[in-house]
């Protein structure tokens, strides 16, 4: 449940939500009502919002096109700002295997486009947690090598 109600009056703002994900979406809306330097905030605003669809996401295939971790994090950040909630990350396939699997290190060593174009277990954990902190569920898809 990502629904929320945001009321902005002078001098208060009130955000109500059933879940933490609703709070994340409401805070994003509140941040979009602020602008300028010094900061100004729209007042006398009431927003009742809930997504029409439970799944709002994108899919990125890093088996065919490698993207650095910083770019994946930037994508997830942008998704959160736009209230998208699912990042389907197709990490591996027959095209390349950029995931370093500790028990099978040769998969990435021989299967990645380059030794520097890989994702470690820590990278995957960081990306999944980064998404969770922003209300974006990261779904890593790991296919067996073709």
Image (cartoon, rainbow, N blue to C red):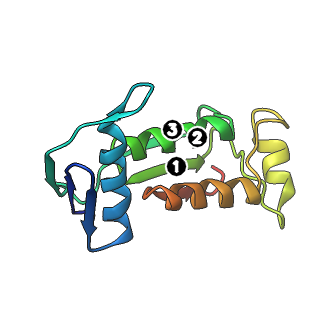
Is 54 drawn above or below residue 11 in the view shown? below
In the image, taking residue 140 as reference, residue 102 lies left or right, namely right
Is 72 drawn above or below residue 86 in the view shown? above
Residue with the most extreme bottom position: 18
Q: Are marks 3 and 2 in contact (CB under 8 Å)?
A: yes
**Tag 2's secondary structure?**
helix
Q: Which mark is residue 75?
A: 3
Q: Are marks 1 and 2 in contact (CB under 8 Å)?
A: yes
Residue appearing at x 27%, y 51% in the figure? 11
* Residue in the foreground of this view, choosing between 141 and 13: 13
Q: Are marks 3 and 1 in contact (CB under 8 Å)?
A: no
Q: How far is mark 1 from mark 2, CA to CA?
A: 9 Å
> What residue is pinned by disc 2?
72
Res. 55 image quadrant: bottom left
Q: How far is mark 3 from mark 1, CA to CA?
A: 11 Å
In the image, taking residue 80 as reference, residue 112 lies left or right, namely right
Image quarter where the N terminus lies is: bottom left
* Residue in the foreground of this view, choosing between 75 and 32: 32
């Amino acid at each position: 449940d990502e629904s929320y109600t945001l009321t902005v009056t002078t001098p208060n703002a009130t955000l109500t939500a059933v879940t933490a994900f609703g709070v994340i979406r409401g805070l994003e809306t509140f941040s979009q009502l602020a602008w300028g330097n010094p900061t100004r905030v729209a007042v006398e605003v009431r927003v009742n919002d809930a997504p029409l669809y439970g799944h709002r996401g994108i899919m990125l295939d890093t088996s065919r096109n490698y993207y650095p971790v910083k770019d994946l994090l930037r994508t997830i950040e942008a998704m959160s700002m736009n209230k998208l909630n699912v990042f389907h990350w197709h990490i591996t396939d027959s095209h390349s295997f950029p995931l370093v699997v500790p028990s099978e290190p040769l998969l990435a060593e021989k299967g990645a486009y380059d030794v520097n174009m890989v994702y470690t277990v820590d990278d995957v954990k960081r990306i999944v947690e980064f998404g969770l902190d922003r209300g974006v569920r990261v779904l890593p898809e790991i296919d067996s090598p073709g």
